Image (cartoon, rainbow, N blue to C red):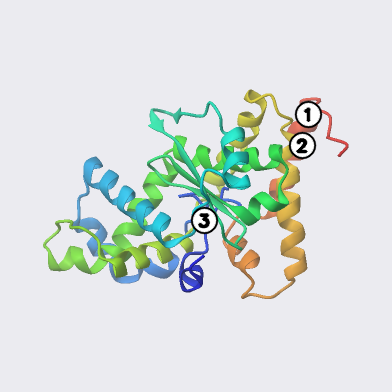
Amino acid sequence: MNFKLIKRITLVILLACSMPAAAQFNFKKVIGGASKAVQAVVISDADMAAYVKEYIDWMDSHNKVCDEKSKYTIRLNKLTQGLSDVEGVKLNFKVYYVTDINAFACADGSVRVFSSLMDIMTDDELLGVIGHEIGHVAHKDSKKAFRTALLTSALKDAAASQGGTVAKLTDSQLGDLGEALVNSTYSQSQERNADDYGYDFLKKSGKNPWAMALSFKKLKELQDKAGGEKNSKINQLFSSHPDLVTRIARMEERATKEGIAKPTK
């Protein structure tokens, strides 16, 4: 992992582009005076697709991607076998060999899972996190978030200087975009919907949906270990995220109401 990049691009997921284990998108730090640029620039679907591809290619080149022989890639491929598309968007999966605990999905269907997340999750828990991230793609959350981050970071100055047109991003602009995505957040309703999508995703896959609550519990344990340390990556990850305790309770309540037994192991 490029450690200089870690400082700028620790993501989310959920479980994202998404992307902990939930993907995180919060534009509070970068919106500022960029609202005029957002209004001035019109980005076509073709432009959006090009920018998303440019961004995910940049991310893949700036992070260590596990090769096909890696135990992580083999495991991920096994878990995602048969997952080809969602709502007409073709899915593709890769593992980043990094110390951060997260996952994210981009609007183009690129799902990236961090190896350290895989280290602490069971297969069902990991699949639930992946389902959560895919939910953001299915609900168009990833596309909306990417557009806002793009216009309030990478294209903020370009929009003003080029009269509302868009152009190929520089390496610096891609870094700014990555930082904007890292510091961003989905709304609580978007996260709840993605949680429910992950829950249903597990059921449709023949897995026990209790795995959603159990995956959140593992993240909560990490958060508790970090205590009140504001600079800890796990606390930064959930600083603008819906309360994990609430999310755990929602998933547990749903599984209980549906009469689904909690796993004993």
Identity of the residue drawn at 63% across and 24% down? 204
Tell me if label 2 and label 1 are in contact, CB under 8 Å: yes
SS at mark 1? helix
User: Along the horizontal axis of the image, is 194 left or right of 54?
Assistant: right
Residue 84: percent from left, percent from top = 46, 28
Residue 188 in picture, x, y percent from top left: 56, 49
Residue carrying label 1: 257
Between circles 1 and 3, the one closer to the viewer is: 3
Secondary structure found at label 3: loop
The three-letter amino acid code for the residue at tag 1 is Lys
Q: Is the residue marked by circle 2 packed among few (<14), some (14-19), or many (20+) residues within 10 Å?
A: some
Three-letter amino acid code at the position of disc 2: Glu
- Precedes in sequence: disc 1 or disc 3: 3
Packing grade of label 1 (10 A; few <14, some 14-19, many >=20) is few
Instruction: List the residue tagged with mark 3.
Output: 24
Residue 24 visible in the shown view: yes
Q: CA distance from mark 3 to mark 2?
A: 25 Å
- Secondary element under disc 2, as helix, strand or loop, is helix
Asked whether 163 or 115 is in front, the reply is 115
Q: Is residue 26 above or below residue 199?
A: below
Q: 10 Å neighbourhood of mark 3: few (<14), some, or many (≥20)?
A: many
Q: Which residue is labeled 2 in the image?
A: 253
Disc 3 marks a residue whose amino acid type is: Gln
- Horizontally, is 55 left or right of 166 in the view? right
Image quadrant for the C terminus? top right
CA distance separating discs 1 and 3: 29 Å
